[in-house]
Image: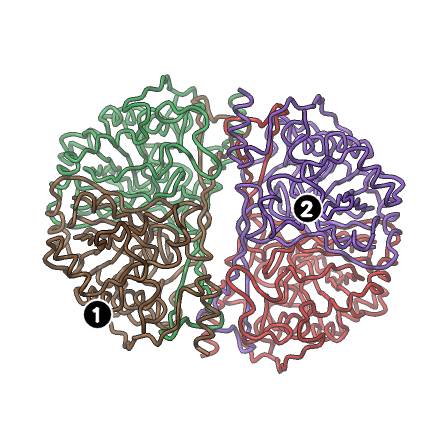
Chain colours: A red, B purple, C brown, D green
Amino acid sequence: MQRKVLAAALGAIGLGAALCANAGTLDWKCESKFGPNDQIGNANYITPEKTLAATKLITKGKAYRLGIEVNSKTPAYPPRYFTVTVVQPGQTNGATLGPNKLTYNDDIIAGWNGVGPQIDGFGHIGIDGVYYNCNKGDIGKITGLTKLGIETVPAIATRGIVLDMRMGGDVVKEGTAFNRAEIEAAMKRQGIKSIDKGDVVLFHTGWASLIGKDDKRYSSGEPGLGIDGAKYLAERGIAAVGSDTWGVEVLPFEKDAGVFEVHQILIPMNGIYILENINTDELVKDQAWEFLFTLGPARMTGAVQAIVNPIAIK
Amino acid sequence: MQRKVLAAALGAIGLGAALCANAGTLDWKCESKFGPNDQIGNANYITPEKTLAATKLITKGKAYRLGIEVNSKTPAYPPRYFTVTVVQPGQTNGATLGPNKLTYNDDIIAGWNGVGPQIDGFGHIGIDGVYYNCNKGDIGKITGLTKLGIETVPAIATRGIVLDMRMGGDVVKEGTAFNRAEIEAAMKRQGIKSIDKGDVVLFHTGWASLIGKDDKRYSSGEPGLGIDGAKYLAERGIAAVGSDTWGVEVLPFEKDAGVFEVHQILIPMNGIYILENINTDELVKDQAWEFLFTLGPARMTGAVQAIVNPIAIK
Amino acid sequence: MQRKVLAAALGAIGLGAALCANAGTLDWKCESKFGPNDQIGNANYITPEKTLAATKLITKGKAYRLGIEVNSKTPAYPPRYFTVTVVQPGQTNGATLGPNKLTYNDDIIAGWNGVGPQIDGFGHIGIDGVYYNCNKGDIGKITGLTKLGIETVPAIATRGIVLDMRMGGDVVKEGTAFNRAEIEAAMKRQGIKSIDKGDVVLFHTGWASLIGKDDKRYSSGEPGLGIDGAKYLAERGIAAVGSDTWGVEVLPFEKDAGVFEVHQILIPMNGIYILENINTDELVKDQAWEFLFTLGPARMTGAVQAIVNPIAIK
Amino acid sequence: MQRKVLAAALGAIGLGAALCANAGTLDWKCESKFGPNDQIGNANYITPEKTLAATKLITKGKAYRLGIEVNSKTPAYPPRYFTVTVVQPGQTNGATLGPNKLTYNDDIIAGWNGVGPQIDGFGHIGIDGVYYNCNKGDIGKITGLTKLGIETVPAIATRGIVLDMRMGGDVVKEGTAFNRAEIEAAMKRQGIKSIDKGDVVLFHTGWASLIGKDDKRYSSGEPGLGIDGAKYLAERGIAAVGSDTWGVEVLPFEKDAGVFEVHQILIPMNGIYILENINTDELVKDQAWEFLFTLGPARMTGAVQAIVNPIAIK
């Protein structure tokens, strides 16, 4: 029956055939690593010392925008959508305002926060109704989360690492899982000695190059983090993990993995933010493997996610 | 008749009595300072050298969130509004997804980009239908600007300066204009030697402390940049100017000033971004007068503005 | 604990103190009165014969709009809201289209269906996850109900009755319950001999006159149908019941009544549509007690409710 | 240059190649047929006598829903869209409300009024900034029209006529214009003696059968009213004209016709409502050529259009 619920639910969210209902590998007893009131998880490791050390990685002063563009054509997880409407209030028939002939545009947005480059907050994913830091049951209202909302994300300024997971080809194949072996091999190739507490790790796969060219393929699978890889990164205490894919975790899911189980390992079990649809192209082109990573998501009270555009500085 | 149009238009946008229609001080012939294709204005001054120098201002590794929270109660320029709705797709009656019992929240946003902490892009303000860099007439469609959209804003990582404009009191009075004298006096008080090309200048007025306490007063006026002050900053080549107020410029407008004329001096005439509803409290409390300022607005294609949360690092 | 859940839930929807958690009077075993596939309930009684008979009530040819106006100021059940935005696509700076100088306005709506004059469809209310006609569990997706959606409402053209429940005063007091005695007394006063299968019964209370004058009072209670009155009407087989109030049922709820239990008696238990915020003023002024009632809600696929404007003809 | 503006504008609204910029046939001097304050045009002809006479057309008591269904897949004039989102406020993890275990769904709508079955109000179309009844310039604000809004549409209960324009085939070909000859031929075939003041005339073309089967064809042209046909109907004083097409008027436009010039003849020049995407199938199947037509558009204050579902009774 569980399978039936799953099928129905995934049918409802439009994923359907791409998933299969395995047993899952979870065996979880929630714990409060940073105290009962904590809402920021491993971002606690981003101390002033950590930030200061990360600023020492800057050697050239080059700044990078890590958000892809987002608009009504951006492939989105169903039924998510996103629209911008540009308006000119009070300027019917070409009227201008004041003797100084002010003209102005404004804009209205309608859609879902989870489209395009986004941070998944800790209220996004739970395990059987339990969220990060043992928050059980209701963490919010329909008008906004009352705990773990995106406004609680602290100022993030820490060491960023980008790992180029391509081996020859331009685009890593869907279903390719990044686990301990793949992660350590990439580190070795790039001369990265360690992944440390409070780091932000980004995977470059080339997958985002499909956007606008083959949206169907882009949306129906992806290379990404496997169960073992998620646990590996969690053990290292990273603050966030991202990728140039829509879901960061590998799809189809690994054999024996549950539905978006990597999301569960990262968010409720370990307090690690997820960053999706991140533009890692230029960093990789410049071989800027380590850098200062900064992120300030718009502080929409009680929001689950936010559309973002992190800034990296090398 | 111009006055009548003004009255009608301002009535439409709900400002009404707070404004008066003066002659305006504009005498503008647009010029292409950075070439005919430029869309980023004075942000051109944020070179790698500039960024690198700004990172040298970091001494403690303390990172600051500069966005205030934004939600349906945030005072907004009429008829702007902003809402978040939290939903649980496919989880009717408490259903979970998969054997791993995935629970998840998503969120929908509906409203205007220009609510709360925001960057005004160069498509926001024009003079008689002419926008930054001599862009005449149509710079966009109803589905998004085709020029000067928020997605064109570059990665901003530069020197930030906060000027504490309070003189004794907690909150600077509405209608208090910041012009050359006031700006230089604040610089002197704080030991800031110069304002340079590519800098981001933030004014701290205490005004944002009214939010939630006296929204009516908050919205009906504010201390802020005067005509002369805007020209002064423009001459220095700053990339952006912000404040802990909803409009950055002084209201009621100065005698002889037009309607939001400071906006016109900054945006179409000089290519300077405006940052509104910025939280400068902690910077001022820490006397962190100069710092690395970073900003990556969500790259919504063709958007006029964006809700932001810049990160400062001292 | 039930009480606690209630308190939390009602707190979430902003009703709070107006309600009290009584035991409820429900003892329900769902049955399929009109067959297992039925989705229209007592509207099955609106046969061509019924419609034809109702048209005989027309004596003057006067047509009435029964919808109040709805806009962003209309009192709405939290967190519901409603907005209209008027735009002029492709007409920047006063441009017109074509040699025939076409000018046009379009409009965007954002908000909830349940604001202002509305029909509650059968997917609106259930009892412990069971909806009309024994529909258990999932009757829909986040993108629309798959059963009992508003698009299933048939063409309604039937006998309408308006009962003037005021006794002297202009406005019936909040908390005044309409039960068998009150209903029959009103019928007697107005010379209405019977309430029959397929009828639409409207209560006039004067309550809607508070809109715009005392929205707070309007929203925090109302006169309306009691438990016994709901059962009385259900026994008569009416197709719909409405009122010039926001919820049709009495608030505060009657002693021993549950939370919106009248809604449960009407919708899931008896297949009776509810019509809220109905403008009965003119009908009552004209003493048009019986009339042809017509209603065609916009057929938004899978919608739960619809904003309506029924037409009565006397 | 006019052509260039046209091309740009139509490009902006996505119609592009389907249109061609002809000279247009307009020669208009607006007049106030029903007095300077009139907002309802030819609906003035729907007097109680007219309504009463129309009710005499009812012989069988059969009621028809004339609205097609509308949802996110309904073909819409770009950039229009329409979405419904179903939510369960306060019922996280399967919680119910109260001892009576209330379960409820609510729904949020986001999109444009002009999708699916719709009435075009008199604020929709103008000629060089002049609207119905010589309303010049500003008829509204961005938050709603202040004149000619959809809330001004009166209760419509009048004689309806459906004309079956198919001659043999199932679907009338796109570009087929309905002018005097075609209209009178259809009347003759169906035994309709006259078209009178206050009537509502519906054209049946079979075009709506393309929806969901060939949306591209559906949207890129249509059979419909020509310039001469529009004038013919206007001379007869009809209150509204509709069709089972998205725009009622023929596309591609007739030789020498301007852009949506039929809309201009009907709305600003003659005060005739337009009804689009009307389901005329069943009426035609039953040969219910004349009937009582009723319509009450949801009274959204200041809205330009409304999604409707008129009720016909035979």
Query: Circle 1 sits in a helix, a strand or a loop, which is it?
Result: loop
**Residue C187, position in %: x, y?**
14, 57
Q: Chain of mark 1?
A: C
Residue in the image at 17% along x and 48% along y: C292
**Residue D155, position in %: x, y?**
25, 40
Q: Do marks 2 and 1 share a chain?
A: no
Which residue is labeled 1 in the image? C33
In the rendered image, which quarter is residue A276 located in? bottom right
In the rendered image, which quarter is residue B40 located in? top right
Neighbour tally class for label 1: few under 14, some 14-19, many 20 plus, Cα within 10 Å: few
Q: Amino acid at mark 1?
A: Lys
Q: Is residue A11 visible?
A: no
**Nearer the observer, D4 or C282:** C282
* Location of the C terminus of chain A (image quadrant): bottom right
Residue in the image at 15% along x and 61% along y: C184
Image position of C23 (left or right of B1):
left
Neighbour tally class for label 2: few under 14, some 14-19, many 20 plus, Cα within 10 Å: many
**Residue D36, position in %: x, y?**
32, 23
Query: Circle 2 sits in a helix, a strand or a loop, which is it?
Result: helix
Q: Amino acid at mark 2?
A: Trp
**Nearer the observer, C308 or C221:** C221
Which residue is labeled 2 in the image? B207
